Image (cartoon, rainbow, N blue to C red):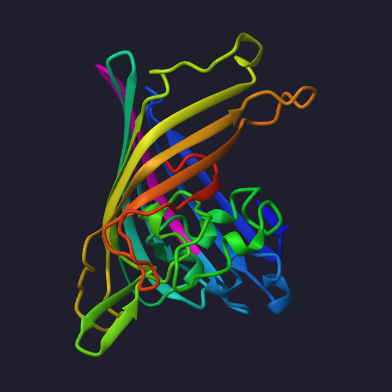
Amino acid sequence: EAKELDGLSGYKAGFEVKTRSKKTTFYTYYKLMHRNDSMDLQYLIYPDEWNIQKINSTINLGMEHTYKYIGGNGTINVLLKSSSLESDYAYAYLSLEAVNKNRLGKKFQLNTRVFGQYGTGSSWAPESQLYLAGANPEEMMDNKFLRSKGWFPSDWANGYGVNTGNFQYGGGLNLRGYNNYLVTEEVDTNDIRTIYKGTSGFAVNTELEFNKLVRFNPKFLKNTFKLTTYLFGDAGMINVNNTNEPFKLSNLRADAGVGATLSINKWGPLEMVNPLVIRFDMPLFLNRIPFVQNDYVAFRWLFSISRAF
């Protein structure tokens, strides 16, 4: 597979093998990404998180396993990623993600995500690092709505700064309340670092769906739209050490709030188009707030395309 999209030259080749039960898939692929010059960055939501004239090539080995149990189902994904031939970077990581969906009686559903990653290397591609608040730029390139600007006002996600913003795409540690914030941590006396991205970390994400308590599903909209409401909470830690320092994790950060998604399932004549999921979350609580904020509990909001997980 070769593609030229929004200033990115990309190449990918690989294969997968499924077990007889179809529940487990083993896969491997080679991937190469390259941006030629600064003009290739002007399309992007986060242009500062890419380098130009740098080749980011990787070998990826992974396994995905799906399973069912009484009251729910889940998926486990394990990925080993390492820089490869021709790469201008030197890094590798092992990640594990487990997502479970559990029915709680007739009115509730509890969705959980457990994620962990351990990374090593002397030179990391910024687009492939682990991000505290959501997906990294490499993952965003796989979403046709979010790989470039134009789908929402630019001031909702104007890079990473001293305050939280209004855009988040699910992935990484997925602490959605810290979106677009540099996230500062005092590592030592007179040593304050930004830790919005790193190489290693772990997180737990939860969503409790409660939309069945009050049904809003008119017959004429039943097969076209689906509204889902939920309470959410995210908590996790990311590494604060530089590549030449001993491994050290940050303080625990957490958020909580309420959110909703609107799924558009039908597009008239465009019946082959996949459902579009619009998400609106309100991270009302942060356990560690930016310096420019005063309250741990406050009105905050964010927009996204697709569920957080």
Question: On screen, 239 above or below 253?
Answer: below
Which residue occupies 35% across, 72% down? 195
The reply to whether residue 25 is visible in this rendering is yes
Task: Report the side of 103 relative to 219 (left or right).
Answer: left
Question: On screen, 184 above or below 33?
Answer: below
Where the C terminus falls, by quadrant? top left
Residue 27 percent coordinates (x, y): 44, 44
In which quadrant of the rendered view does residue 44 lie?
bottom right
What range is drawn magenta here? 58-77
Residue 252 percent coordinates (x, y): 22, 61
Question: On screen, 136 above or below 28?
Answer: below
- Check residue 231 for magenta coloring: no
- Check residue 73 for magenta coloring: yes
Task: Report the side of 87 relative to 172 (left or right).
Answer: right
In which quadrant of the rendered view does residue 289 lie?
bottom left
Task: Report the side of 63 relative to 186 (left or right).
Answer: right
Seen from the viewer's position, the closer of residues 298 and 62 is 298
Q: Look at the magenta stretch and give its main secondary structure.
A: strand
Task: Report the side of 39 relative to 113 (left or right).
Answer: right
Seen from the viewer's position, the closer of residues 273 and 56 is 273
Which residue occupies 80% across, 23% down? 269
The reply to whether residue 37 is visible in this rendering is no
Q: How many marks?
A: 0
Which residue occupies 69% across, 78% down? 38
Question: On screen, 125 above or below 174?
Answer: below
Residue 8 percent coordinates (x, y): 67, 64
Seen from the viewer's position, the closer of residues 47 and 257 is 257
Residue 52 percent coordinates (x, y): 62, 78
Q: Residue furthest bottom?
A: 190
Q: Residue furthest top?
A: 219
